Image (cartoon, rainbow, N blue to C red):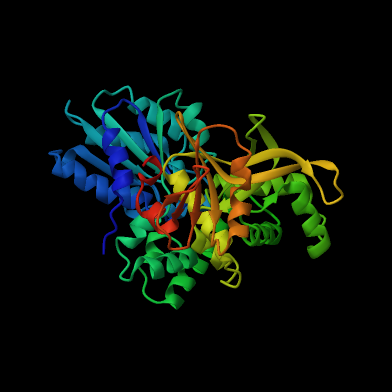
């Protein structure tokens, strides 16, 4: 069964022949290689490109490496990357006329000096380059530096809920429950049975994600790294920082880990695209607050597998799903802070900070969004809209709830809608 990834496919199609290096990044196993080597490859063929003008090469494929006289065994033994001279000679032998050639290169970070190689290809007007990679430090940072403005990043997430539902056989209510439990890694979604899904997620973590981070960053204390990942898994949607995490380690684990080491590990997780951080933003003061931050997992199934599916809180899971959906729709997403001064229980005036779950910006558009799993009564609703009523601008204010209520505005102009409508309609915020 094939899962359509039209959102990302259209991004690649729009970027054809734009003179830039198209770099598809994202967490391992989110579907980058399939997008490039299957979906986009078939699009090129259907659009009239001759097969011999499409060069596909995967740097993690033994068969492809043998084509250029490289051995994956030798590369591993010698702790090096693929020889760029051998690869460039292979490409020169493939490009034999002046027609446009499309280079589809998978796991490019395994090629030594890949920045220089790709930049050299851009000097050939008949080469259009598309690459995939799984590491932010090797790719995203270099798009702005080594590629000197010639890089065009397409960031890819695991399946969102709409993509998930395109192959799910049940209704949207059961679908969301399964999606929030097992996530959207395509290989997992296409597995049958809860045991198979859970086993695959746990194997992916132990055999790919952790090993990849440890190997790439030469981590010596793997147990500390994994303990930190467990703590983050238990605290999605909660404000934290390296100092807080250090205190947790000292009181619970009796560990002497430093805040600098924790910061380094957090960077490793973000570089591998396992997690993303959301910074706090003072809505009234129009300024960012450096710390603490919130952390969200790029895939909830991975997060739940990390905790052996023992700690699946619906409120936090829903917040994580909304965050990922907003990021996939290309919004920048911050945690909103609304300072207020009001009377406390003693009758004295005191400063407080109210929180807006998400401040979403895209161009000139801004939305304030609260994630409310359920709003059973007026007291809960009053709690959710309280931050909104202390924001004095005219941007749209929205509460997303799992309650099956139709979309409606209240007397304050605040929109309440259900999560199913929001997730299944990418244009819903604009209505």
Quadrant of the drawing holding the C terminus: top left
**Residue at the front extreme, as displayed:** 411
- Rendering coords of residue 19 (x, y %): 31, 25
Rendered image quadrant of residue 391: top right
Residue 374 in view (yes/no): yes
Q: Is residue 188 left or right of residue 80?
A: left
Rendered image quadrant of residue 354: top right
Rendered image quadrant of residue 337: top right
Foreground pick, 139 / 56:
139
Seen at 26% across and 60% down, the residue is: 2
Foreground pick, 110 / 197:
197
Q: In this view, does 416 lie to the left or right of 245?
A: left
Quadrant of the drawing holding the N terminus: bottom left
Q: Is residue 82 left or right of residue 53?
A: right
Foreground pick, 266 / 70:
266
- Rendering coords of residue 232 (x, y %): 65, 57
Seen at 83% across and 61% down, the residue is: 251
- Give the number of callouts: 0
Residue 217 in view (yes/no): no
Where is 46 relative to 119, above or below? Answer: below
Foreground pick, 25 / 314:
314
- Rendering coords of residue 49 (x, y %): 15, 38
Where is 26 relative to 184, above or below? Answer: above
Where is 3 relative to 355, above or below? Answer: below
């Amino acid at each position: 069964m094939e899962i359509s990834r039209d959102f990302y496919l259209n991004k690649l199609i729009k970027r054809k022949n734009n003179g830039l290096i198209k770099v598809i990044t994202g967490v391992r196993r989110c579907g980058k290689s399939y997008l490039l080597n299957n979906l986009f490859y078939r699009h090129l063929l259907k659009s009239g490109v001759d097969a011999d003008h499409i060069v596909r090469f995967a740097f993690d494929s033994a068969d492809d490496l043998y084509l250029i006289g490289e051995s994956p065994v030798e590369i591993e033994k010698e702790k090096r990357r693929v020889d760029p001279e051998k690869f460039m000679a292979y490409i020169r032998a493939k490009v034999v006329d002046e027609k446009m050639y499309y280079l589809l290169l998978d796991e490019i970070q395994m090629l030594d000096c890949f920045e220089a190689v790709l930049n050299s290809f851009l000097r050939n007007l008949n080469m259009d380059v598309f690459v995939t990679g799984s590491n932010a430090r090797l790719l995203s940072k270099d798009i702005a530096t080594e590629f000197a403005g010639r890089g065009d990043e397409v960031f890819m997430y695991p399946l969102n809920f709409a993509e998930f539902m395109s192959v799910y056989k049940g209704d949207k209510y059961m679908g969301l429950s399964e999606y929030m439990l097992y996530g959207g890694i395509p290989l997992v979604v296409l597995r049958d049975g809860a045991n198979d899904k859970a086993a695959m997620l746990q194997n992916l973590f132990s055999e790919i994600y952790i090993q990849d981070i440890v190997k790439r960053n030469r981590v010596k204390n793997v147990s500390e790294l994994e303990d930190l990942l467990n703590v983050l898994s238990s605290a999605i949607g909660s404000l934290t920082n390296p100092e807080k995490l250090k205190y947790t380690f000292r009181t619970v684990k009796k560990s002497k880990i430093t805040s600098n080491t924790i910061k380094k590990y957090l960077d490793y997780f973000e570089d591998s695209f396992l997690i993303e951080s959301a910074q706090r933003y003072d809505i009234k003061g129009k300024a960012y607050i450096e710390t603490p931050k919130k952390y969200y997992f790029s895939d909830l199934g991975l997060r739940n597998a990390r905790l052996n599916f023992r700690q699946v809180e619906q409120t936090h899971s829903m917040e994580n799903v909304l965050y990922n959906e907003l990021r996939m729709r290309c919004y920048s997403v911050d945690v909103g802070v609304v300072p207020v001064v009001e009377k406390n229980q003693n009758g004295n005036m005191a400063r407080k900070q109210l929180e807006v779950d998400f401040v979403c910006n895209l161009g000139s558009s801004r939305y304030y969004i609260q994630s409310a799993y359920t709003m059973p009564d007026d007291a809960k609703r009053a709690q959710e809209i309280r931050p909104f009523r202390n924001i004095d601008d005219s941007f749209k204010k929205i509460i997303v709830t799992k309650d099956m209520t139709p979309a409606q505005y209240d007397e304050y102009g605040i929109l309440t809608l259900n999560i199913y409508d929001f997730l299944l309609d990418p244009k819903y915020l604009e209505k």
